[in-house]
Amino acid sequence: MNFNQNYFEIFGLPIEYDIDPGGLSDRFLELQKEVHPDRFASSSEQEKRVAMQWATLVNSANETLKSSLKRAIYLLQLKGVELEENPQLPPAFLMEQIELREKLEDIEDGDGDLDELDSFKREVKGVVAAIENKFSDLVTEDLAKAEVLVYEMQFLNKLLIAANQLEEKLLDY
Amino acid sequence: MALLQITEPGQAADPHDRKRAAGIDLGTTNSLIASVREGVAATLPDMEGRHMLPSVVRYTAEGPIIGAEALEQAALDPHNTIVSVKRLMGRGVEDVRSLGEQLPYRFSEESSGLARIETAAGVVSPIEVSAEILRSLVERASETLAGELDGVVITVPAYFDDAQRQATKDAAQLAGANVLRLLNEPTAAAIAYGLDTGDEGVIAIYDLGGGTFDVSVLRLRRGVFEVLATGGDSSLGGDDFDHAIAEWLIEESGFEGDLSAELQRALLMKARSAKEALTSAEQATISHSDADFKVDAELSRDAFNELISPLVDNTIRACRRSVRDAGVALEEIDNVVLVGGSTRVPLVVSKVADYFGAQPLNDIDPDKVVAVGAALQADVLVGNKPDEEMLLLDVLPLSLGLETMGGLSEKVIARNTPIPIAKAQEFTTYKDGQTAMLIHVVQGERELVDDCRSLARFELTGIPAMVAGAAKIEVTFRVDADGLLSVSARETSTGVEASVEVKPSYGLTDDEITQMLKSSFDHAADDAAQRSLAEARVEAGRVIEALGNALAEDGEALLPAQDIDMLQQAIKKLQERLSGDDTRAITEGTEMLGRASEEFASLRMDAAVRRALAGKQIADLDNEMSDNEV
């Protein structure tokens, strides 16, 4: 096994941001059918170990590639970009974030309407999708700008997590 | 093939003989064993035609009694008769007490970890109790199938944490069974249904057993069962319905004070009968009368429904959560499968139907469906169906985390992550010259460590002495396909491997298991040696067979002639050792053969991966290679 292969290569996919989720998932299943340890339940310890390593690698690759945020971060890493822990974000973006945060707080402080929360999540996802589109172009042209977009995605991802936590609370999980 | 002449006295020489495999449903209330015979998976009955083995062990001075005979004595000898032991697996005494019920056992006070019970036959752990049940089932199968089992698949609730899974595997080891896989019960049920119908789509499995509740959402596509999400409650089941009825009875009787263990057991058994009667009847009569306690009560279906409604609602809430975790819309779920005897309760069926908006499937006996699915999977894993495409992709049921400063749990691997998986986390020292570090691994979703399950404490030692914060210790967590965790650690700046000592919070240490295995052979000293030799031979045979098959399939395509020759020689050498009875020589020979074939195993896997991506056969790759050489 060649551990130097990157996740895209493991799946036989071109190293680019846009990915066909159906194609990724098909390749994931085909690979697991070959490498999963269950295929080697009656084999030697060596084959079991190799299978375990491969299946783990295929799972990790799939987890990374199928998430648009993790895929973006990974792609930047491949291009040698090291992300900062506390990045500077454009003021305009931060203003937009404050407004979104306030909106979420209003939903929580109000009667916690699930429909409102739903439309809020849709709005945030719309913003994320637009950033992802920009990232897809910029990652081949301007890494510094692409890097900022990833920070924005991370920011919005945290907001979505907060929205999901509120949803769990409202649904009484 | 000449390579495969490994014969043991009394065993068939034909390597193409079908292997003996079985699926075991190790249940809270009842256990079953099933096997595929002539293409049909079915549960195996005992000599008296009974399929279900009550999961009950009664310890007497003369030895353990297992099953129906033990159950009959449960009310008379409650201290020595262990029922529903599954609820104690991987649990401490405090957990057991917090289950909110009075258990009639005398818990041994000596150990703070795993709960242990004092019996007429000495102190036993839940793992040993489970091992007795497994041993009884395995013996039944060996008799029915006329030979030792080559491997078993044991089912566990999907929601079982690492300690509970490890306890189950340890029990199998004590029982002398070769575990091919721990399989999640809902997945087993899906296999039982899936293979019959050949469906594609999203399935929800609602599994309410005696002591556990599981819900799983699976996608079946191209022969692959992919678990999308799983959830539930490992301490909620049909037994709780019995308890609800029993509490109602006590209320009705006006009795106050402490109930004796015998009376508790008697009331619970009457409650269970009433519950079962109410499956078809609208009304059940319950009466009990002795010196201390008198009750004569009528329980209507409606009143029963009211008693259990909050419990059933809890299961529906878990369903909602799992559907959400799975990322599917409720409408996308094509089928709902009911598993577990407790799904016979009419209120359960109607609430499940209401929530999912579909009539649930229950045409396979809900008591047997898990064992049947496990048997089908065992048949595949043991190698009886080399062309079978079926594959199960499971997920981690509960997040794994580490204790950080302030008693918080930092999640390392999130729940519903597909397994096997590995994640590395970096730690550093906080004192100058610090050479050891304590790491506490927990499992669960809550923020506070105290609200999660403690799995183990790892002590990392041998860290090179450096200034505070300079050492970088990379701790890698691996979860295998059974959902079991292992940990390794490395100091990254020097490359020094730190050693990891595992102290399971609620389990047996390896030493304890070895000790138990040894003591079970005490009465027959030769047995242990005989058994090691037999095991070494089986393992050697397995490796020879696997390598022989692999060479036949891919040897010429992947290896130069001299390497093939070398491996053939190595096989021959091990075969020679097999004819002797030197256990160590055989074990070492097996290891040597394993090491010699390591590179080949890797090459085969690489080829398989290429094939999967290109949709090509190895033969084609071979042709390409020779073309290039020309």
Image (tube, rainbow, N blue to C red):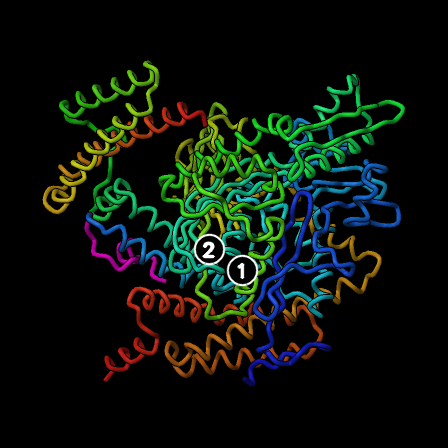
Please tell me which residue is depicted at 77% across the width and 46% down the height of the picture.
B57
Q: Residue at x 33, y 68 (%)?
A: B611
Spot occupied by residue B342 in the image (x, y as percentages of width and height):
62, 40
Q: Is residue B27 left or right of residue A52?
A: right
Query: Mark 2 Cα within 10 Å, few/some/many (few <14, many 20+)?
Result: many
Disc 1 is placed on an element classified as helix
Q: How far apart are the two marked residues, 1 and 2, measured between alpha carbons? A: 9 Å
Q: Residue furthest left?
A: A141
**Image quarter in which the C terminus of chain B is found:** bottom left
Label 1, on which residue? B377
Query: Dominant secondary structure of the magenta stretch?
Result: loop
Q: Position of residue B156 (x, y in %)?
A: 58, 47
Q: Is residue B338 above or below residue A119?
A: below
Q: Which circle marks residue B392 in the picture?
A: 2
Q: Amino acid at mark 1?
A: Gln
Residue A82 image point, x, y percent: 24, 40
Numbered range of the magenta stretch: A1-17
Q: Give the quarter of the image for residue A81.
A: top left
